[in-house]
Amino acid sequence: MTARPLLAVVTTAGDERIDWLRAGQALQRVLLVATAHGLRTSLLDQALDRPGPRARLGPGSCGAGHAQMVLRLGYGPEGPPSPRRAAQEAGTGRGHRAVSRPPTPPARTTPTASRSPRNVRPA
């Protein structure tokens, strides 16, 4: 890889939900491999937020299909660490707002009407 950063485009053959999922899985692998090799990455999704630029990156322009993500790969200084709460503060309500979760729905049971009764003899 050169000393200058490179741009990459994650594309899919289609543009449906399953394609978005697969693009996310591919992006996850790219980011993990890049990190393992000491590369820095930047997601440049602003280019895809508007129809015009996204169409210019679409089928036929970069050869492979629908653009799902644009990213920059290169070497550079390590950025500052992400802010984290101390482990003992996690879940205590200090430093973040409480989030209420909906109650867990009851487990579904299988209908018993399809089962044959045990103590009933056929007529």
Image: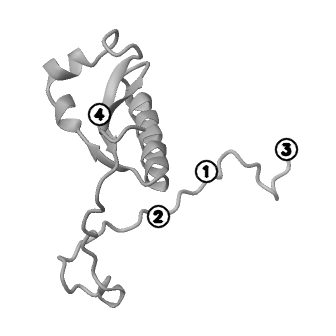
- Amino acid bearing label 1: Pro
Sequence order check: which comes first, mark 1 or mark 4?
A: 4
Q: Secondary structure at mark 4?
A: strand
**Mark 4 closeness class: few <14, some 14–19, many ≥20 residues within 10 Å:** some
Q: Quadrant of residue 117?
A: bottom right
Q: Disc 4 designates what residue?
A: 70
Mark in front: 1 vs 4: 4
User: Looking at the image, which is closer to me, 109 or 96?
Assistant: 96
Q: Are marks 2 and 4 in contact (CB under 8 Å)?
A: no
- Amino acid bearing label 3: Pro
Mark in front: 1 vs 3: 1
- Amino acid bearing label 4: Val
**Percent x, y for residue 106?**
47, 64
Q: Residue at x 17, y 21 (%)?
A: 53
Q: Are marks 1 and 3 in contact (CB under 8 Å)?
A: no
Q: Quadrant of residue 67?
A: top left
**Percent x, y for residue 116?**
76, 49
User: Looking at the image, which is closer to me, 88 or 2?
Assistant: 2
Q: CA distance from mark 1 to mark 2?
A: 15 Å
Q: Quadrant of residue 43?
A: top left
Q: Secondary structure at mark 1?
A: loop
- Amino acid bearing label 2: Pro
Q: Disc 2 designates what residue?
A: 106
Q: Disc 3 designates what residue?
A: 122
Q: Disc 1 designates what residue?
A: 111
Q: Give the vertical position of 16 relative to 62 (above or below).
A: below
Q: CA distance from mark 2 to mark 4?
A: 43 Å
Q: Residue at x 82, y 59 (%)?
A: 119
